[in-house]
Image (tube, rainbow, N blue to C red):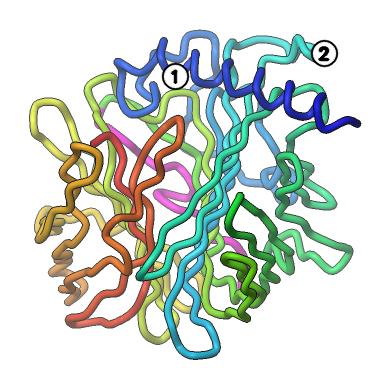
């Protein structure tokens, strides 16, 4: 296949995705609050099945495979990596063949250090082989970026995997290992987003151990650390009056994990959700009236004021921390722009994690 043909396909996919974003943008971040008429709803009680649910769910409108990694190099310097594949259906109904397929794919990759944040973005159309996901053997790809399993990959654990991506001034290649099954978020994988029925199916693999190579400006370094993968799919994950979210994935001492997010509404109200995940993989919702997320410091980027440092308080868990970004200017200036970067935290618990801010 010629480079010219790939370029044309990527361009066509990008135009389609951005046009959809403009049509939908008035209803929540990235149009995720648009009414999902014709798409199936997310309902409680789903029985997850692996490897099938590692693969795509094209009948739903929105889906992603989302990995972040907190790493250090040989000198002990911290860095972060992101690899994300998004799928979005532009219309409901039977899947079209070839270029008539209604799936649009988008990939984001990023590298963050204290002194730099670099990112890249790819677009693709469904139905022509340029992007997609296979459940078994597991493989998610867009152009030459890929998250890939092998004959050794355990379907319950979704490991081991290899991961690679590149931009004009960076690249990385990682091996991901884990020894515990994936974890269902929310209530048995049913993750509420509002009191009006918006929800997603959501599970994670928060126990990845990552090792590999990061290359910046043609200089390669070995890196290692921890990684976290999120899987979500939905037809309408936000209500029309929800503007965005502030999302945390935290690696705690003793291998506990915490996923926490708040969804912001136009009227100033907030909805706070999350799960505490024990070292054994047991996942418990942490909904409680005393839980709070409080911005501590703001960063101005491209005319936006973003809360990049936070106080997190979960009284029932004896949990009170303050977070600090590795690089407060970790702005993803992509078609759907947002802030995403590694953080560290101190307080009753010390550790590292990732923060995502959308809708600002």
Residue 207 falls inside the magenta stretch: no
Dot 2: within a 10 Å radius of its alpha carbon, few (fewer than 14), some, or many (20 or more) residues?
Answer: few
In x, y percent, where is residue 12? 66, 18
Q: Residue under circle 2?
A: 97
In x, y percent, where is residue 93? 66, 10
Say if 184 sits above or below 76 in the image.
Answer: above
Residue visible at 30% across and 24% down? 28
Residue visible at 49% across and 20% down? 18
Say if 86 sits above or below 66 in the image.
Answer: above
Residue 271: which numbered mark, if any?
none
SS at badge 1? helix
Say if 169 sits above or below 35 in the image.
Answer: below
Which of the pair 112/52 is nearer the observer? Answer: 112
Q: Which image quarter: residue 241?
A: top left
Residue 308 visible somewhere in the drawing? yes
Q: Is residue 63 left or right of residue 153?
A: left
Residue 21: which numbered mark, if any?
1
Q: Is residue 210 left or right of residue 158?
A: left
Q: Which image quarter: residue 10?
A: top right
| Magenta residue span | 178-195
Which of the pair 104/202 is nearer the observer? Answer: 104
Quadrant location of the N terminus in the rendered image: top right
Which of the pair 208/109 is nearer the observer? Answer: 109
Secondary structure mostly taken by the magenta-highlighted segment of the chain: loop
């Amino acid at each position: 296949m010629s480079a010219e043909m790939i370029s044309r396909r990527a361009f066509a996919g990008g135009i389609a995705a951005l046009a959809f974003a403009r049509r939908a943008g008035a209803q929540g971040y990235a149009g995720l609050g648009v009414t999902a008429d014709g798409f199936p709803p997310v309902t409680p009680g789903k029985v997850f099945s692996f490897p099938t649910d590692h693969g795509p769910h094209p009948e739903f409108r929105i889906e992603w495979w989302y990995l972040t990694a907190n790493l250090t190099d040989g000198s002990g310097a911290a860095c972060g990596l992101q690899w994300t594949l998004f799928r979005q259906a532009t219309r409901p109904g039977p899947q079209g063949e070839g270029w008539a397929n209604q799936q649009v794919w988008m990939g984001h990759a990023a590298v963050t250090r204290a002194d730099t944040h670099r990112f890249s973005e790819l677009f693709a159309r469904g139905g022509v082989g340029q992007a997609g996901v296979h459940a078994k053997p597991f493989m998610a790809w867009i152009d030459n970026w890929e998250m890939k399993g092998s004959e050794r990959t355990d379907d319950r654990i979704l490991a081991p995997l290899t991961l690679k991506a590149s931009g004009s001034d960076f690249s990385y290649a990682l091996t991901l290992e884990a020894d515990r099954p994936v974890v269902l978020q929310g209530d048995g994988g049913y993750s509420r987003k509002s009191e009006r029925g918006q929800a997603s199916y959501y599970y994670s693999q928060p126990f990845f151990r990552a090792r590999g190579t990061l290359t910046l400006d043609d200089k390669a370094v070995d890196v290692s650390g921890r990684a976290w993968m999120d899987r979500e799919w939905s037809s309408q994950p936000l209500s029309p009056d929800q503007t965005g979210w502030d999302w945390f994935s935290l690696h705690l001492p003793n291998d506990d994990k915490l996923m926490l997010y708040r969804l912001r509404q136009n009227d100033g109200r907030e909805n706070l959700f999350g799960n505490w995940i024990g070292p054994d993989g047991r996942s418990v919702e942490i909904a409680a009236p005393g839980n709070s997320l409080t911005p501590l410091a703001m960063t101005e980027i491209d005319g936006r004021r973003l809360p990049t440092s936070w106080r997190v308080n979960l009284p029932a868990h004896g949990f009170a921390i303050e977070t600090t970004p590795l690089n407060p200017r970790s702005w993803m200036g992509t078609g759907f722009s947002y802030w995403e970067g590694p953080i560290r935290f101190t307080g009753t618990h010390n550790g590292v994690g990732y923060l995502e801010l959308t809708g600002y």
